[in-house]
Image (spheres, helix red, strand yellow):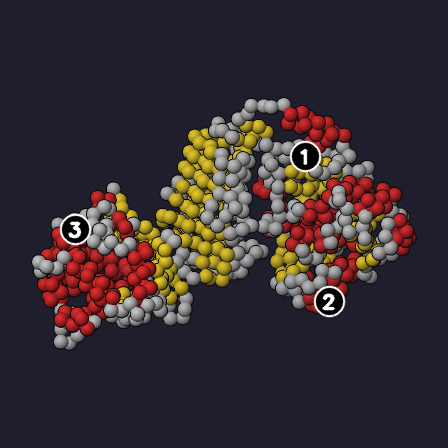
Amino acid sequence: MKKTTSKALASAALTALIAGIIPVGQVSAAANTEFQRLSGKDRYLTAVEVSKAGWAGGADYAIVANGEAYADALSAGPFAKKNNAPILLTSSKGITNETISELKRLKVKKVYVIGETGVVPNSILETIKKNVTTDVERIGGLDRYATSTKIAEKFGTVNEAMLASGEGYADALSAVPAAAVRGIPVLLTKAGELPKATSDYIKSQGLKRTFVVGGTASVSDKVKGLVPDSVRLGGKNRWETNAEIIKSFALDFNFDEAYFALANGATGKEFADALTASALAAKGGHPVIISNKTADAATTAIINEKLSPTTKITAIGGAPNLSDSLMKSYQIKGETMEAAKDITGNAVVSKDNVELKDMKVTGNIYLEGNNAELNNVTVNGTVFVNPGKEGSAKLNNVTADKIVVLSGSNKSIYLNNVTCNTLYVSSKTQTKIVLEGTANIKNVEIFSSAIIEAMNEFKGTVVVLDNLYVNDIELLGEYSGTITVKDKKDNVKLPGSSSTPGGGGGGGGITSSDPLKVKINKAIAAYNAFVDGHPNAVKNYPEVKYSNKVMTVNIDKAKKDQKLSTTFDAKKNMITAPRLEKLNELMGNVDIKVGNKTLIDYVVSQQSFEKYANKDGSVNYNAIAAKIAEDGFDFNHAVDVAKRLIGNKLDVTAPAVTVDGLTLQSIERGNVKVNFENVKGKELKEGIEKMFGTDYAGMTYGQFEGTYKLNLKDAKGRTETYTLKVNFTK
């Protein structure tokens, strides 16, 4: 992979080769690899080593910047990524022979020199033209601020930009890698004044968003207020700012590799290694973590949060800058697991189809293989779920402090009977997480696009976090806890509701709308009163519950294989006029209508059923009850009547079905969808038979088991989705 000037690395490579040749029977092994180092005897030769490592096959373009004056060089990082170019360094006194040799090796067609003649003299350009290529272009302005805008102009039209201090390199160093992977420029500013060159560029571009890097000491609130849609990204010091930027742009970075560079010292010239690292890191979308000579708490925290034992880490610059012991302390240790055993420390699952069960881990578990499964596992730390964008994982009876989902497909992560304080979702692609069984999760925090489906009532809180992305988030199922949407940009579909862009920006509990709640609860209350009042007649009748747009019907398991015809024929004499009237009343309470009539009213309004209506058009319940009770009228007869009614309407558009004014559009169960809106009777009949079958005489209660999605539309065209669950209980 990457080259190094360190002889120790050659020894390590030999050791690794020998280890690979000698077969070893193993259950587990160390997951982490030794850190790498790219360095030369000075910043100029370190830049050459970085170029060799990242552009082994050459490059069409290269960037040359002053290695002692940070101001002009800082804005070069994103421009290097745009042109897939390494950044090489020069002093104002002259360019080294090693740098010229590297430009020759790269076989560059064009070299961009950053800064005016006071930073990079013309003599250096002439040396490049003489020895490498005649196509050399200087990009520079009257000062560092103008130079940053001249570089920005090379990006063409952009909607976003980074704004960092031009009076110190610390914050800008953190901005450069993020800007590079995002493909946007870095503009420089004074702390208390927005330079004219920067202001003019922003106005000419019509930027829609500006990321202000650093605290108010670096960029004042006054300056922040002068740029469009500004978002401040900063901390108390450069290390916190670096961590904040990496967290904020987490979905842009790939954390399988990370680069480290010094960003502090007495000379004020410690920017150079981080600058050259930014070009290399950006090639793979990797972060640059800036470091002091000793570990800062913020640096350690971001490493623990974003890296894993399998992350390849590389130090840019020599050991006097970042010591070997410091780099080793930055490595996350872990044991690769292929079979279960208790672990003191971290465990890593990197192979596919690994199942671990009945074990305890004192640290974290990193699930990085596809189709990993944990059963009866206790983790004192965090479970990181990262099977890849097409991958999946299952956690059954897992207890952890935190579960972090970093990747997965749109139907992939299953959490069954899990217990944790926080479920955190941060995936580059929309990942579906299914909560099954009892989800003892106190908080769900959503940073990225996601689908969360609660198969049973979820009682924890859900927070859609404020972030820099426009995410698509959908919550399915039943949620009784508070749902808070903090990001006004996100497209959030709350349980059973249509998309809600922004949810309401800034926070506060936001719950889904439930226009039928009152009607349904009233109907269920009437049903329960009927059941309570007739304990003998309605023994073992279904239990009906409702919460948060989900109705659950629990039926006695003994009835699952029982035919509907058996029940009908055995109890048809119990279908009295008062009970039919009560049924019609219940439907009226919910306001279920077919063609603006209740179902019973609609049936008796049809020409062939006129004898079941009174002279005033109202329902003659006595006539219906008498017909049902007569000897010749059994279940099959009732089915024949229904078929005849439908058969006369096959080529006619089916009447609209409404519930309290909402029009039923469709009903879904599994992969079967029955459309109800603007369809012919024939289509409706075929859809229902596809869902339930055609053998009406043999139809059992069990055929109705499942989860149904009822999609309804209001007068303004907004969609409301309700869920019906039919279960068979013991």
Residue 146 visible, this orientation: yes
Q: What kind of element bears circle 1?
A: loop
In the rendered view of the protein, which quadrant contains the N terminus? top right
Q: What kind of element bears circle 3?
A: helix
First reached walking from the N terminus: tag 2 or tag 3: 2
**Quadrant in which residue 608 is drawn:** bottom left
Q: Which residue is drawn at 70% across and 68% down?
A: 204
**Residue most toward the bottom?**
616
Check disc 2: other Cα within 10 Å, few if <14, some if 14-19, many if 20+. Answer: few
Amino acid bearing label 3: Thr
Q: Is residue 460 left or right of residue 617?
A: right
First reached walking from the N terminus: tag 1 or tag 3: 1
Amino acid bearing label 1: Phe
Q: Please identify, in this view, whether the residue under mark 1 or under mark 2 is nearer the observer.
A: 1
Q: Name the residue under label 2.
A: 200
* Disc 1 from disc 3: Cα separation: 73 Å
Residue 566: image tag: 3
**Are circles 2 and 3 on residues that touch, CB within 8 Å?**
no
Tell me residue 614's x, y (percent).
Answer: 13, 73
Q: Please identify, in this view, whether the residue under mark 1 or under mark 3 is nearer the observer.
A: 3
In the rendered view of the protein, which quadrant contains the C terminus? top left
**Are circles 1 and 3 on residues that touch, CB within 8 Å?**
no
Residue 514, compared with residue 285, is above or below; it is below
Q: Name the residue under label 1.
A: 35
Tell me residue 643's x, y (percent).
Answer: 22, 63
Q: Is residue 487 left or right of residue 516?
A: right
| Of residues 151 and 48, the one drawn nearer to the viewer in this rendering | 48
* Disc 2 from disc 3: Cα separation: 82 Å
Amino acid bearing label 2: Asp
